Image (cartoon, rainbow, N blue to C red):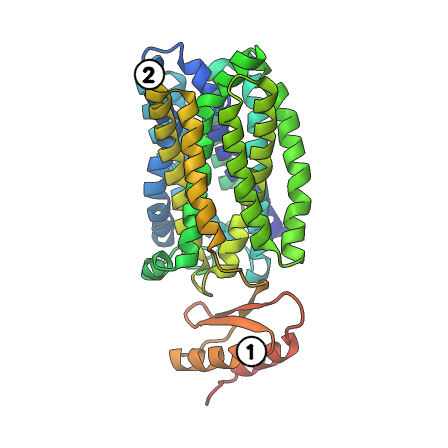
Amino acid sequence: MTASETRASVGLASIFGLRMLGMFLILPVFALYATHLPGGQDRTMVGLALGAYGLTQAMLQLPFGMLSDKIGRKPVIYFGLVLFALGSFVAASATTIDTIILGRIIQGAGAISAAVTALLADSTREEHRTKAMGMIGGTIGLTFAASLVLGPAMYQYLGMSGIFALTGVLSLLAIAVVKWYIPDSGSTHFHSDAEASPAKLGDVLRHPQLLRLDFGIFSLHAAQMSMFVAVPFALERTGHLNIDQHWEVYLPVVLVAFIVMIPAIIYGEKKAKLKQVFVSAVGLLLVAQIGMAASMNSFWGIVVALTAYFIAFNVLEASLPSLISKIAPPGSKGTAMGVYNTSQSLGLFFGGAMGGLLSQHFGYSAVYEFGAGMITLWLLAAIGMKTPPAVKTRLFHLGKMGPDQAQLLKTALQAIEGVYEAGVIAEEQIAILKVLQSGWNEPAAIKLLEESTHGIGQ
């Protein structure tokens, strides 16, 4: 990476991290806090407050990304960060659960994920884009883990209003980072590997393997959000822990989960066993949900179940985007990821709403049973998934060519040894190859691509 690419990647990863920090910090403490608010005794409202931002985020992130193609990335990001800050300050000033729900809805409306990803694509060359996206994914994962530990500790010193206000301030500071730290990309254009295309939505939504993964991320985050309606009460009741002590449980659980997750992902990728690792993690997630339902009166049972849950959660969060990349057709990866991210946001809303509704009317055991039911359906879908190809993606720049030349080049590239699938996008002047992780004929591909600049097929 050049210095400019590194700066853009680090800066945009920090924007994601700051925004996610604001979303996640309240998860481990909000359900307990809400019981002291007018209307907070109704756990249906508590679940809505937790998940409300997911609904507006799901509705607006793809439109905001497309808007950024027309008016520029940074203006859309500024607007989204202002909305997020506004929602945070509304929630910080709230004295009722209804006002917090309103604040969370406004927070979610600051849906800048697609615009940030598009700016990252503008700011990095294709051959380094996967690396840059990985920095963002790693930042989100670390932010989530840190939030579980920091949330209870910060609640002790700042209170819930202080946490909301801090996230609003961080969002405003993020505007300064975008303005003065992240370099201007110089040009704005569509990137099929990073952005959603309306023309390709139909194909992605009809792709059975991608739909299994979309249902998976929906289920994963629905179970996660519903769980945080119930788990804080379970820790308080069985462990006799004050709200500011819950980090003492989450810290070792998160550390163990990260230590176990890393070799599991490496094994799956290096040994072409990603499906086996993936299905095993979904199975472990189901065991964890059942374990939490069975351990409602056992503190150590809950701790063990939480550890199993976060091991599985981390493995799945890391492997799902990789599976999307391997399965999505060349040229449709950005669209596939857009649908995937929207499914995730819808899962957050659905899980929060269902967790609140079920705990209010049927008790906390029903929350875990709901999670177990969602994960059971996912496990059945995952078992039936085709084994993903053991491939990696390579992108190459092309010269100008017409549609007929692009089709000829695509056919020629697909005939090269070790090329699993090829796509040539003439309007973006790139070729996207899915190639075997080892043993593909790269020199032949490079030679053919060089010849294409002089008019293949003419």
Establish if 449 lies above or below 281: below
Establish if 27 lies above or below 11: above
Q: Which mark is residue 137?
A: none
**Closer to the camera, 80 or 183?**
80
Name the residue: 51% across, 50% down. Answer: 321
453 horizontally vs 1: left or right: left
Q: Position of residue 25 (x, y in %)?
A: 51, 25
**Closer to the camera, 428 or 352?**
352
Q: How would you rate the neighbour count of disc 1 (Cα within 10 Å): few for under 14, some for 14-19, many for 20 or more?
A: many
Name the residue: 40% across, 35% down. Answer: 348
Eye-nearest disc, 2 or 1:
2
Indicate the secondary structure of the residue bearing disc 2. Answer: loop
CA distance separating discs 2 and 1:
63 Å
CB under 8 Å between callouts 2 and 1? Answer: no
Establish if 202 lies above or below 114: below
Identity of the amino acid at label 1? Leu
Establish if 414 lies above or below 237: below
| Residue 162 visible in the snapshot | no
136 horizontally vs 47: left or right: right
Q: Which mark is residue 449?
A: 1
State which quarter of the image contains the N terminus: bottom right
Q: Which residue is mark 2?
A: 42
385 horizontally vs 68: left or right: right
Identity of the amino acid at label 2? Asp
Q: How many marks?
A: 2
Name the residue: 59% across, 49% down. Answer: 277
- Quadrant of res 404: bottom left
Q: How would you rate the neighbour count of disc 2 (Cα within 10 Å): few for under 14, some for 14-19, many for 20 or more?
A: some
**Closer to the camera, 231 or 299?**
299
